[in-house]
Amino acid sequence: MSTQVSSVETPHGEARLHRDRSHHPIATLLLGHGAGGGVDSADLAALAAELPRQGISVVRVEQPWRVAGKKVAARPEVLDRCFVAAAGALRARTPLVVGGRSAGARSAARTAHELGATAYLALAFPLHPPGRPEKSRLAELEGVDVPALVVQGERDTFGTPEEFPERFDMTVVPGGDHGFKVPKSGPVSQEEALAIVVEATLEWVVREVVGNRTAG
């Protein structure tokens, strides 16, 4: 399977959709990237490579600021409008799961209700700026009213797993930092760390999205 890339017009310029389709999809996962990287970050790329084989189509949204080659991310409200505009081009017939990594996870949390998402995935959610726990962004997560999974690195300086409320499903990447990078002498290899992200996401989508749909 190869990634299909298409342009989408948003109120703030051209965005791109990077689609990795499943031949027999049971769900669609719409992902936003972080402020320090793009859709090729290791975790997003791993999900796009592996999940379509398991029945989950993956669509990564490349924000206009990134398409334009800018080095600084747009304001949160701009990111949200562009994410919603990109989602409007999907026309997915399967349950929609929205999410992303870091700043993309924040934007997906703020727009999940508007997009009618069935569930929400947060990869490396930046709960607060490093060293500034008083600047909490927990309210954004608390505003999500659908099943939510948080995948967090054990050493994430933007918020360790222990700082999140217990009501969220949590998967911890042992030794992982904000980018899920792990030390060479750590408890898991880099390949194993990314496999944890993929397997946790797959198991959760099957349980919370596909399972609930079947039960209903």
Image: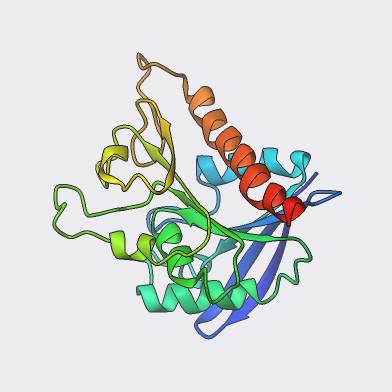
Depth check: give the residue in front, 110 or 73.
110
Q: Position of residue 74 (x, y in %)?
A: 38, 72
131 lies left or right of 74: left
Residue 41 locus on image (x, y percent): 50, 45
> Which of 87/143 is in front?
143
Residue closest to the far front? 216
Visual colour scheme: rainbow
Residue 176, above or below 90: above
Q: Please tell me in which quadrant of the rendered image residue 15 appears.
A: bottom right
Is residue 109 rendered to the left or right of residue 47?
Answer: left
Q: Which residue lies furthest to the right in this view?
A: 23
Q: Name the quadrant of the C terminus.
A: bottom right
**Residue 206 visible in image:** yes
Q: In this view, does 63 lie to the left or right of 131?
A: right
The answer to whether residue 1 is above or below residue 138 is: above
Q: Could you tell me which residue is drawn at 30 percent across and 65 percent down?
A: 139
Nearer the observer, 183 or 140: 140
Which residue is located at x 53 percent, y 67 percent?
67
Q: Find residue 138 and report its horizontal and vertical position in percent.
A: 29, 59
Tag count in the figure? 0
* Image quadrant where residue 84 sits: bottom right
Q: In which quarter of the image is the N terminus?
A: top right
Q: Position of residue 126 (x, y in %)?
A: 32, 53
Task: Tell me, yes or no, if residue 38 can be seen here.
Answer: no
Residue located at (27% from left, 38% from top): 162
Please name the residue shown 42% across and 31% down the image: 173
